[in-house]
Image: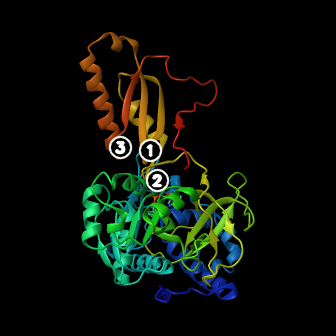
Amino acid sequence: MKEKIAFRDAQKECIDGQALRKYQLERLKETVGHALRTPFYQHRLNKVGIRSSDDIRSLKDLERIPFTTKDDLRESYPRGLLATDMKKVVRVHTSSGTTGIPTVIYHTQEDLDNWTELVVRSIVACGVTSDDVFQNMMTYGMFTGGLGLHYGAERLGALVIPSGSGNTKRQLQLMKDFRTTVVHATPSYMFHFSSKIGELGFTVEELNLKKAFLGAEPYSENTRKKIEEFFKIDVYNSYGLSEMNGPGVAFECIYKTGMHLWEDAYILEMIDPETKKNLGDDTQGELVLTTLCRQATPLLRYRTRDLTTVVKGNCPCGRTHRRISRIAGRTDDMLIISGVNVFPSQIEQVIMKIPEVGNNYQIYLAKEGALDKLTVKVELYSKLFSGDLQDLERLKRKIQDELRASIVITPMVELHEPGSLPEFELKAKRVVDERIKI
Ligand code: DLL
């Protein structure tokens, strides 16, 4: 990258209007240059007459570029979208895909530094300082929620507790002993946390909690309010996706009036998911993002599948990057279960490989307390029900183990007689989602 983005100016990012557009154009040209080094984009862009970055003369030229989808990423697995020499790559993150083939995002050190600075900027916008104690209750590993926020909080100079997810008692003990002021978690975990605190012998009053960053899955304004009231803290919404690094794409500031999407790092477009026409700022649409500061895996016009709206008016904080509203839903069938992305087709692939399983199944989602509970109901061939009960138990465990290996979470498995699950004449409705929006 020719010039390093002034991410350090984390208090306010005020390049707006013309200056922002000029800046975006420079970065877009550079990004297209990077993208043309990948087999995938070389083919895609040449087809529409883009052979070098000079073919991008204005931001309007973005519309000549075809959209990139999650399927494109999968089909390019593992290296079709790598734009730099592998020697320069220092980290890789993958995310689950519909068929078990993951999507992969490579990062150079500069990519990671830029991501980290976006996170610094995001958490500074929520009033976090180097005096804070930050407990990261997101899963570490391939999931970007762990390392993404970790490095940002460290770079800011906060004390970071990399506790990871789960083990609520230990989380509480750490929180109490180290006087944690800020936590990062999924909203469902935070709810679960609130239900366990008394049972585990702790009180909210003996903690020193001030703020929480909640994201990685949809939640309502009411959920925010309930968590804020229970813990007497401020909750900030955080949006991101692994294809765009992870968290740090859009973040609320202290005014909580929508999430500022960092437009010097991403170009924001809103499209009609059916017609794929650009909608402008006035209507709810599917968010499409283009990376502007990524070397190893540049992505052009990536369809996030997330439905949102651009928030009108200015934010009292003075930041001029546009804000997006709470994510209203997705245009595809991806389920987010306890923060983990799961496609129904992944479940189908696993169960349909098991010879005892018949033709029908149902994916049932509900809440158990605050946590998401996944039950996979499968029909078996009838002769199995006249056999040994222990065999059925063994089969249940086998299905459960194979599902866990594929989708990372452990579902409940129910075995049903043939014909007992709902049948459909047209499209099957396999997913029943009864997680009520609180
Ligand atoms: O969930 C990155 C992340 C980690 C964001 C931690 C925030 C905090 P993926 O696993 O690739 O990445 O899932 C991305 O999760 O397309 C949305 O559908 C959903 N999502 C993420 N944040 C929010 C949010 C991470 N605040 C997918 N509200 C996205 C609603 C969200 N949905």
Distance (Cα) linking label 2 and label 3? 16 Å
Q: Which mark is residue 406?
A: 3
Q: Amino acid at mark 3?
A: Ser
Give x and y (percent) for residue 316.
64, 81
Q: Amino acid at mark 2?
A: Arg
Looking at marks 1 and 3 on the same chain, the residue that comes earlier in the sequence is marked by 1
Residue identified by numbered label 2:
74
For the residue labelled by badge 2, is the local secondary structure a helix, a strand or a loop? helix
Nearer to us in this view, 107 or 284: 284
Q: Is residue 64 visible?
A: no
User: With 130 as the anchor, is 259 left or right in this view?
Assistant: right
User: With 229 as the anchor, is 323 left or right in this view?
Assistant: right
Asked whether disc 1 touches disc 2, contact meaning CB atoms under 8 Å apart, the reply is yes
Q: Residues within 10 Å of mark 1 (few under 14, many from 20)?
A: some
For the residue labelled by badge 1, is the local secondary structure a helix, a strand or a loop? loop
| The quadrant where residue 149 appears | bottom left
Looking at marks 1 and 2 on the same chain, the residue that comes earlier in the sequence is marked by 2
Camera-side mark, 1 or 3: 3
Q: Amino acid at mark 1?
A: Thr
Residue drawn at the location 28% of the way across and 68% of the way down: 176
User: With 30 as the anchor, is 346 left or right in this view?
Assistant: left
Q: Is residue 194 above or below residue 16?
A: above
Give x and y (percent) for residue 248.
48, 71
Residue identified by numbered label 1:
99
